């Protein structure tokens, strides 16, 4: 029995010794960094596991693209940001007389695009396009219209305010169904819809005393049934190509641009002697008539413009022997000038249809980029009228190259300006008699 117990103990001690020896061997192998080599199957499994782990990692999401800036409502007349409702509202095209005793006038400080075009008897006339006309206490005085003013006005899809006009030469366009006009004398060219009233002035002829205001215009629009918002079938929602906010087109990209600080239009409008002077501080051109500042009667603000266009167009009598003119303002192939930032370049122009805008192109055929702000447009008679810029006369034969100075005659006078033809006595009498009714 004693011998059996001894055998069992001996066996247990040997088993423990063997186990301890195995642990030591394992520890020794670990301390030397030597491990059993992996089999091919084990290596393949390990690589696949690592690749799967890499593929399972999610890729970082791309940065979201910034939201585009919302398109701001802008005036098609000035390129400036305006209230969205104004972009929908039809403007007024107002016929302003330019006679000396008819000055000053109301509503001029709301004019965004201003036209001056010759009529008859060496007298010109003005038309203002008013974009923001609501709330005006007085507009005018208001005078008669000519057919070419109507065609210029249609570019803006306006409601036209006028006090008559020569029926034989203007009635056809004014009685078209698409042309909305409020005619102060009534009759075949349209009703006055109760829009106008007289404000007499001491020493001022009665034809210079017709006025209206925004309340009367609104009532007249309702009575006539005219649409207040732009008509999709007629309105072209783009006119000039304007500079972007913060940018200015100083015309420095044109090597033949010339200085243009003083613009004297007396060679085209000998009675009114319209002129403008550039102020480099605010970069605006200030307008004068008869040598005096042309101002708004209510605010006293002098008319000023960022952009000046001088546009040549063919002019002919409406019928042979008549004093009334017709300007071909939808006739391509004529030239002109663009003035801004104290500089002037030569341009050509094109107007394709009644409601299409007049577009201006540089001598490379690119549309001119216009600075944001108000525009003055002079339409002058091709082959006849002249004007002066900084003392240099640009006559009917001055085209294209502006850097070549006009030739001087032996007496020192600048050549190129055509003589102004006076109307005959019969023509002058015809125009004067017609004007008495308007």
Image: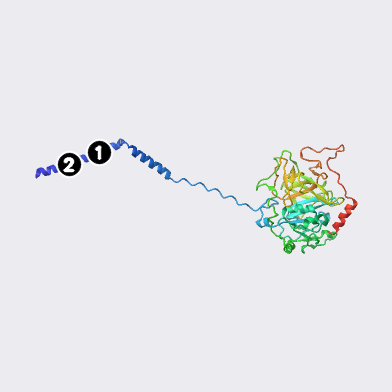
Counting residues from the N terminus, which is met first, the one under dot 2 or under dot 1? 2
181 to 284, vertically: above or below: below
Measured as percent of width and height from the top left, residue 126 is found at 79, 53
Camera sees residue 84: yes
Left or right, 309 with respect to 2, comes to right
Left or right, 149 with respect to 5, comes to right
What label does residue 13 carry, if any? 2
- Camera-side residue of 83 and 292: 83
- Camera-side residue of 262 and 369: 369
220 to 403, vertically: above or below: below
What label does residue 337 carry, if any? none
Q: Label 2 neighbourhood size at 10 Å, few (<14), some (14-19), many (20+)?
A: few
Residue drawn at the location 80% of the way across and 55% of the way down: 170
Mark 2 near mark 1, Cβ–Cβ under 8 Å? no
- Camera-side residue of 437 and 343: 437
Measured as percent of width and height from the top left, residue 45 is found at 36, 41
- Camera-side residue of 326 and 208: 326
Furthest toward the right, the residue is 425
Camera sees residue 301: no
Furthest toward the left, the residue is 1
Q: Which residue is mark 1?
A: 24
Measured as percent of width and height from the top left, residue 273 is found at 82, 49
279 to 103, vertically: above or below: above
Callout 2 secondary element: helix
Measured as percent of width and height from the top left, residue 316 is found at 83, 48
Callout 1 secondary element: helix
Q: Quadrant of the N terminus?
A: top left
Q: Label 1 neighbourhood size at 10 Å, few (<14), some (14-19), many (20+)?
A: few
Residue drawn at the location 88% of the way across and 52% of the way down: 427
Q: Quadrant of the C terminus?
A: bottom right
């Amino acid at each position: 029995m004693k011998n059996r117990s001894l055998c069992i103990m001996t066996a247990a001690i040997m088993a423990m010794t063997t186990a301890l020896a195995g642990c030591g061997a394992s520890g020794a192998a670990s301390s030397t960094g030597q491990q059993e080599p992996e089999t091919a199957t084990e290596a393949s499994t390990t690589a696949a596991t690592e690749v799967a782990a890499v593929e399972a990692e999610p890729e970082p999401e791309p940065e979201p693209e910034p939201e585009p800036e919302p398109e701001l409502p802008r005036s098609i007349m000035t390129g400036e940001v305006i209230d969205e409702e104004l972009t929908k509202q039809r403007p007024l095209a107002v016929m302003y007389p330019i006679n000396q005793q008819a000055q000053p006038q109301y509503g001029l400080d709301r004019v965004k695009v201003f036209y001056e075009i010759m009529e008859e008897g060496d007298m010109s006339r003005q038309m203002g396009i008013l974009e923001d006309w609501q709330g005006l206490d007085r507009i005018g005085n208001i005078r008669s219209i000519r057919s070419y003013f109507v065609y210029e006005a249609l570019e803006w899809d306006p409601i036209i305010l006028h006090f008559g006009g020569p029926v034989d030469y203007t009635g056809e366009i004014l009685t078209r169904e698409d042309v909305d006009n409020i005619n102060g004398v009534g009759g075949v060219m349209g009703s006055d819809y109760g829009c106008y009233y007289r404000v007499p002035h001491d020493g001022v002829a009665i034809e210079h005393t017709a006025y209206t205001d925004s309340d009367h215009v609104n009532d007249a629009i309702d009575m006539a049934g005219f649409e207040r918002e732009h008509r999709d079938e007629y309105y072209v929602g783009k006119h000039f190509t304007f500079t972007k906010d913060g940018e200015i087109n100083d015309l420095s990209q044109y090597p033949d641009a010339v200085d243009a600080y003083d613009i004297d239009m007396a060679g085209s409008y000998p009675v009114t002697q319209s002129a403008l002077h550039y102020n480099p501080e605010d970069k605006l051109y200030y307008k004068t008539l008869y040598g005096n500042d042309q101002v708004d009667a209510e605010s006293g603000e002098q008319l000023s413009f960022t952009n000046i266009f001088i546009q040549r167009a063919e002019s002919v009598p409406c019928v042979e022997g008549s004093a009334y003119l017709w300007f071909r303002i939808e006739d391509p192939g004529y030239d002109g000038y663009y003035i801004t930032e104290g500089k002037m370049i030569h341009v050509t122009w094109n107007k394709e249809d009644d409601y299409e805008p007049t577009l201006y192109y540089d001598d490379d055929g690119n549309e001119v980029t216009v600075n944001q702000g108000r525009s003055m447009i002079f339409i002058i008679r091709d082959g006849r009228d002249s004007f002066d810029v900084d003392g240099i006369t640009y006559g009917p034969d001055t085209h294209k190259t502006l850097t070549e100075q006009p030739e001087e005659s032996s007496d020192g006078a600048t050549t190129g300006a055509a003589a102004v033809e006076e109307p005959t006595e019969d023509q002058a009498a015809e125009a004067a008699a017609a004007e008495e009714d308007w």
